[in-house]
Amino acid sequence: MRTHTQAPTWADRFLADLARHGYVAKAARTAGISCSVVTRRCRTNPAFAADVAEAMGDPPAEAREISYPHS
């Protein structure tokens, strides 16, 4: 019997790349989609939105914005 393996979807590629570096736009480009596709999917699919939040968890230092305390 042959075993079928499913090719990664755009969502799989997007989430893997997002988890690697923390940039939504770059991960979307890697997955071959636009940021608006990601936004729409997050609004309509709570499980995907949770996966995105988890993938963004703690972005690498180079992906973090530096914030300065307000005086």
Image: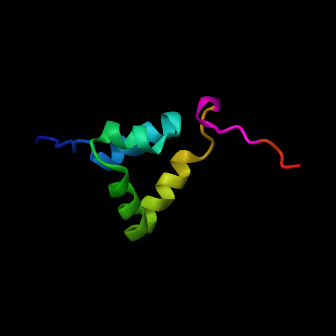
Residue 26 percent across, percent down from the top left = 41, 37
Residue at 37% x, 51% y: name it. 35
**Residue 41: x percent and y percent?**
36, 62
Quadrant in the rendering for residue 62:
top right
Is 68 displayed left or right of 44 in the figure?
Answer: right
Q: Picture coordinates of residue 22 (x, y %)?
A: 53, 39
- Residue located farthest toward the front when viewing the structure as drawn: 71
Q: Residue furthest left?
A: 1
Q: Nearer the viewer, residue 12 or 26?
A: 26
Question: Residue at horizontal 89%, vertical 49%?
Answer: 71
| Residue 8 image offset from top left, x and y in percent | 27, 42
Image quadrant holding the N terminus, namely top left
Q: What colour scheme has been applied to the protein in the rendered image?
A: rainbow
In this view, the residue in front, 5 or 71, is: 71
Q: Residue at x 40, y 59 (%)?
A: 39
Q: Tell whether 41 sits left or right of 49.
A: left
Residue situated furthest right in the rendering:
71
- Residue in the picture at 54% in, 54% down: 53
Q: Is residue 32 within the magenta segment?
A: no
Q: Nearer the viewer, residue 1 or 63?
A: 63
Seen from this angle, which residue lies furthest top? 62
Report the number of discs: 0
Boundaries of the magenta span? 61-67
